[in-house]
Amino acid sequence: MKRFYITTAIDYVNGSPHLGHAYEKVLTDVIARFRRQMGDQVHYLTGTDEHGQKVQASARKLGIEPQQFADQVSAEFRKLITRLEISNDDFIRTTEERHKTVVRQVLQQLFDKGEIYKAEYKGFYSTRQEQFLQEKDRLPGGAWPEIYGEVTEITESNYFFKLRNYQEWLVEFLTKNENFVFPRYRQKQVLEFLKEPLNDLCISRPRERLEWGIPLPFDEGYVTYVWFDALLNYYSAVADKPGVWPATYHVIGKDILVPPHAVYWPIMLHAAGIPLPEGIIAHGWWLQSGAKMSKSTGNALNPLDLVDEFGADAFRYFLIREMNVGQDSEFTREQFLVRYNSELANNLGNLVNRTLNMTTRFAGGVLPAAEITEDLERSLQELWAKTREEVITLCEGFQFHTALERTMAFLTETNAYVEKRAPWKLGKSAEAKDQALLRTSLATMAEALRLAVAVMQHVTPTATQKINAVLGYTPGARWQDELVWGAKLNGAKVEAALVLFPRPTPPATPAPAAGAKPAAPKAKAPKPPKPGKPDTGAAPTAGR
């Protein structure tokens, strides 16, 4: 089995989970599930980042210890991944001893090699971003960008990592490894960033200013800068698991690609003699009216609200169907409902109900074998063969949104096949050929349904399990064997019905307040004209 280690960014516990967190977990989960289906030995890591000044400040504001604050918020992220049916193999917290031990070991190693030195620093500091700023970070008018929040000028002694010594090495590495960052145009952005000289990285904070962090092993008067601490979690989580590191892919948002994950991280690993990950996947942002959803702007959406209303599978489907990995995408409830109704309810759900209903009506609930293969059946089978190959190739290239589009197109054609065969008409005929066609159509519908959900199961795992269950089918151990059109459902006993994606219930009309006059009844809209009769455009006559 091929080793496949995939990680997400660990989420900073300075606030509750939002849509961006949910998307990153789901995207990584879809990749992990797909690779398991392909036969890889997958290890999926996620977790929470729990040190730093913002966590300390938030805890003090609530009058509790930072560890208690971190425990509470970390539990929210654990709840999120459970509700989203994330199949992670590990969840790391940077307050765990296994992580702190590795961080101290790496720091001591770099210090002993002369890669870390102490110096006095005078400059501008952003508490919100927990980083020192440079003049080039200012806006053209001299102001600091809003993302930095309050910026103050400070002078203090700190420890620095010799980042600039490795700039040429990193440029050479990225030039030789053109696919290190996906999508590739993001890698070009990293190289553009590296055209400017790097400054050495401040990797400490004085304990009198920040207590909530990992103490430096060579100077207890300082704690580790939160980024240096956090970036080592991907390695610390598996440092004691031989054969897992290096990571195959690391999934992050584009906003933390440069400089943390594409500059600091590879240089830190290289300087410490730790192999680099094979690649980084940088995904886009979810937008609302063209603006990024975020906690700071106040337009972040609670993902669990939609999961509670529509279920995890529908939510997962929308996220993967709507966003092209690496690009931004708009999120609106209206667009969610379009996908939900047209693709999940009307297309997939409709085929499920048709298959179960007609097999129950015309075959006693037992799926028959196909007896006749005519042009309609051959055409659908040929489309499936093409769809199967396209879906696998697209998923291997992280084009999951297009893979779902191809799958939906196949389901659309299957429903069109049902309309053309019209089993409900064949069931009324006593002709032997019609009865044979009836059995063939029922078998074809069921087989097409089985195959379609097989290539969706990494996106909609629960729906796939439920559909297989009502089809009376248990998939085999090798996923790719399940993608061959055949007769696996012959003789299977089906259930009578399954409601997978129920129509959303419209919000109830609030009861009138006591003493209020009842609202006047709404006038009925005029009925559309009957086919074949001209619409005169006249207003309806009152009272009719």
Image (cartoon, rainbow, N blue to C red):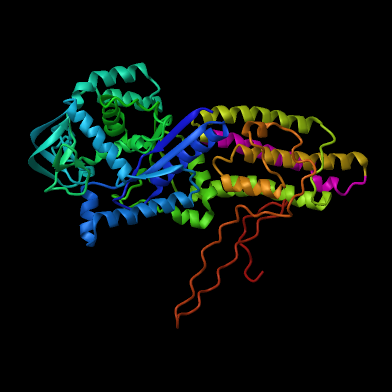
Q: Main secondary structure of the magenta part?
A: helix
| Residue 439 position within the rendered picture, expressed as x and y whole percent measured from the top left | 83, 42
Check residue 420 for magenta coloring.
yes
- Identified at 41% across, 34% down, the residue is 241
Q: Quadrant of residue 141?
A: top left
The reply, left or right, for residue 488 in relation to residue 341 is right
Task: Name the one closer to the observer, 382 or 220.
Answer: 220
Check residue 77 for magenta coloring.
no
Task: Name the one closer to the observer, 333 or 390.
Answer: 390
| Residue 121 position within the rendered picture, expressed as x and y whole percent measured from the top left | 8, 35
Q: Quadrant of residue 151?
A: top left
Q: In the picture, which quadrant includes the N terminus?
A: top right
The reply, left or right, for residue 148 in relation to residue 461 is left
How many callouts does the rendering have? 0
Q: What segment carries the magenta color?
A: 401-430
- Identified at 31% across, 29% down, the residue is 262
Q: In the picture, which quadrant includes the C terminus?
A: bottom right
The reply, left or right, for residue 484 in relation to residue 369 is left
Q: Quadrant of residue 437?
A: top right
One can see residue 342 in this view: no
One can see residue 482 in this view: yes
- Identified at 75% across, 42% down, the residue is 419
Seen in the picture, residue 377 relative to 500 is either above or below; the reply is above
| Residue 370 position within the rendered picture, expressed as x and y whole percent measured from the top left | 81, 37
